Structure formats: C-alpha cells, structure tokens
Image (cartoon, rainbow, N blue to C red):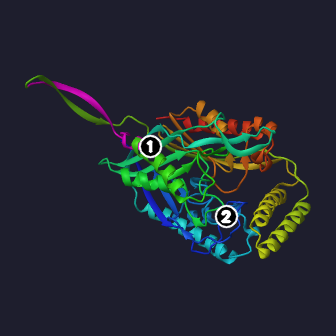
Amino acid sequence: MNHLWTGVGRCDITPTPGTPQGGWGAATHQRGLGADMPLYATALVISDSQQSVAIIDVDSIGFIEEWAAKIIDAVANVAGLTRDYIRLSCTHTHSGPNTFRLATITEGLDMVINYLESLPLRIAGAVWQAQRNLKPVNFAAASGKCEINVNRRMKLPDGQMVVGRNWEGPVDPTVQIVRFDDLNGNPVATIVHYACHPTIMAWQCQYFTPDYPGIVRLTVERELGGICLFLQGAAGNISPRRGFTGDLGVYRHLGQLLGLEAAKVGAGIETLRREEHFKGVLQSGAPIALYEDVSVNTGSSMLKVISRRANLPIKQFQPPEELEAEAEKTRQELSRLRNEGNAEAIRAATARATQAGWRAGYASRYYGKTHIDWPIQGIRIGSIALISVSGEPFIEINQEITRNSPFAHTLFSGYSHGGFGYIPVRSAYEEGGYEVEASPFSPEAADLLVREVHQLLEELAENSE
C-alpha cells in the first residue's frame, strides 16, 4: 500500500528572564522572572508522493497577523512549502511572553521585540528538522474523556455576565488523539486535541509556563514515546475547572490528568488493524483454539489540504483616531500609576488600557468595513479531518461542525494562522459579557462560519479512496 510519511521537529522558544509577560489585564508586574518549564514550538510534517503539509504547535498566547505572516513566510522559505500548506497554531497559554499587546509595555519592550524577531527562523528550523526525519507511518485516531474544563460564561444574580464557572453551560470533555507509528509499531508522533483556555496560571504568576498543554505533552511523550503536539480546540467560552491562580502545582496537576487520559487513549490505538485467522485446536489440559493475527491496513492514506478565507460580518466601529486617542490616554494613566506603585490602581488601569487597546486595534483594521476575510484551513489525513480557524470560536460551533461532519474524526480548532477575536454564537449576544464585547464580529458570523466549514469538509471528503 501507499504509506504517508511523517517527521517531527522541535525548538526551544523559552524567553529569557526579564522578557515582558502577557495575557492578563489584572497583572501589576510586566517582566517575567524566568520559566517554570520550557516553552516549545513543535512541528509535524506529513507527506505523500505529491505534497507536504506542516502542522506547528507553538507555546504562545498568539500572534497578530503581522508576526504570524513573518513566521509562515520563514517556514515557506526555509522548508520550501506553499504558505497554504502551513498550519501555525498556538496553545494560547496566558502565562507566556507578551507577544500581542506591545503598546502597553513600558519595561523591556526591546526584549520582547528581540524575542519576536527570533521566532520565525527558529520555528522554521523545527519544520526543516521534521522534513529530515520523515519516515513511512501507519496512523489511527480515537477519543477519550477528561473533565478538567467548564463553561466560563456565568451570570450573576444581578444579571452581569462574568468569566467564572457555569456548570450548566455547554462544554465538551472530549480528548481526541491521532497517533502515527513507524512500520515497526513505534510511536513517531501523537496529536492531542482538547478545548480549554490555558488560564490556570494567572495574573499572580511571574513565571513563564506553557500552562497545562506543556504537561500534557510531557506526560504523553513519557508514557508513549515519540513527540506530542497539542492542538487547542474551540475554547472561546471554556475555562479550566480550577484556574486564575499563582499556584504552579495546579497547572501541573490538571495537565497530568489530561495527559494521562490522552496517553491511555493513545496506548489503546492500533495503527495497523489485525484480522483473526482460526488455525485449529491444540490438545492440552483443555482444548485450546489457535489463532494467527494477520496485520492488514484497509484505511485511506489520502492527504488533502484546502485553505481559504470565509467572508464574515463584523460590527461597526467608531473612527480609529477617536479610539486611539482614548487608548493613548489610558496608557499614559497606566504609566503614571506604575511610577506611583499602587498595586490596585495599576491593576484597574491595566485593565482599562487593555480594553481600550483592543477597541482601537479593531477600529484601525476594520473601520468602514462590513465583512472581513477570516482564514480557515482543512487537512485531511485518511478518515481524519483537522480544521483550523483564526480567533477564539465558542464550543457550540465545534459541536455543530463535528455533529454533521462526514469524517469519522473531526478535530476543530481556533487559535491558528494569526489574529485575535472571539467568535460567539448568536445567543451570546443577547446575554452580553466580555467575549461579546471583545469580539469584532456581528451575531451572524458564527452561523456563516459553520456553513463555510461544512462546505470545506464536504470538499475534503470528495474522491475518497
């Protein structure tokens, strides 16, 4: 049969001590003290006789479009890949370096710029390394369940919608695993897919961490061997059951729970199916049936990639110069308060500057527009579909997409290809709350995205082997 070929590569992207940390408007510190454990960029290259695709898992909260484009361009140049055949995905850890809110940084901006400038070639090197490790593989997928996540949109008695723990809200505890083995049955790579905001480590934490996805990878690699990639799901309205803490033990514990479930599911996957052939009976103390288990592989090895942009409707924004003036005013206030050293005042001012900053950023990009082109990509690997979009889709979008997918295994992810923006479902706009306020999209966007992804899935499913 025709095998797919797979290779893996990895580079260390841990920031140096003193690099600005990002991800929390409530943080009163700017610089990180150091790393609790390394941060990585991990690359998986999959090839057939005609094409190759690179899937990249980065320990980062994410990148604006400009920096994502620089990384993808570097990968394309170094690895010789078409840009549409490169998937750049982030775990969305909130305790990594500040790679996206640079305007609020008043200490160490030069360090984070140097850090960002170093990433394109380092990440491209991981893809290049993966290309040189290519080997024929068998692969299969399975799923398990781990309940470390919860819906985070909680309504208080006064009607206010806050980020908390909504035990009645929609959530998906599914852990999806794809395992790639060499022809001797040794694991080469494992993909773990799960939906949960990496917000266990919060504003109190002064150490860089990959949050729970780093522990998941470590656990799976220890238990199964090979290299593990973590692909974040549709976590726009999903949080960890325990989080918003400075206790490093919490992310290690929850990451181990998810990692052990992933390893258990992965260990049970047989990438090469075996058929049972009855050979006869051996007389012993009891008559014993004898069998020969013959390895067969009847699955599809088709590799197919489709990249396009969905035209999604957006809100109307105020003139950018007005919102930028408001943002600059909040940044000046924040700078003054940092000099005074009042922790509570700094925290409140940081939150105001953060909110004003993203409003100004949206206006500068989208003012006067009614729709924006939003990246979506589909990768077919046999009976497995990996779907990735930019931004932070709600879990209900994932549930609708997977429920009607023509594939046996559909792994739907956000946090890919650069850019930020929550993608709430229509009902969330009636409830309000942070995700709706922080979204550039109008209420119809989620429904249109679901239709676009369903069309993409149908195209991926065409010409099945």
Q: Which of 46/327 is in front? A: 327
Find the residue positioned furthest to the left: 284
> Between disc 1 and disc 2, whose residue precedes?
2
Mark 1–mark 2 Cα distance, whole angstroms, equals 30 Å
Image disc number at residue 22: 2
Q: Nearer the viewer, residue 235 or 41?
A: 235
Give the image location of residue 45, x and y in percent: 48, 55
- Depicted 162 relative to depicted 101: above or below: above
Residue 301 appears in view: yes
Q: Which mark is residue 261?
A: 1
Disc marking residue 431: none
Q: Counting other residues with Cα less than 10 Å from the Cα at mark 1, is it few (<14), some (14-19), or many (20 or more)? A: many
Over which residues does the magenta segment extend?
A: 265-283
Residue 258's x, y, as percent?
A: 48, 46
**Mark 1 residue type:** Glu
Decide: few, some or many residues near mark 2? Use Cα within 10 Å; few <14, some 14-19, many ≥20.
many
Q: Position of residue 119 (x, y in %)?
A: 58, 69
Above or below, 123 against 174 in this view is below
Give left or right: position of 154 versus 294: right
Give how far across and how far down residue 98 sits, in percent: 66, 66
Q: Secondary structure at mark 1?
A: helix
* Residue 433 on the magenta span: no
Q: Which of the two residues, 152 or 15, is positioned nearer the viewer here?
A: 152
- Is label 2 in a helix, a strand or a loop? loop
Q: Amino acid at mark 2?
A: Gly
Q: Quadrant of residue 280?
A: top left
Question: Is 281 placed left or right of 227 in the picture?
Answer: left
Residues under numbered marks 1 and 2 in contact, where contact means CB atoms less than 8 Å apart: no
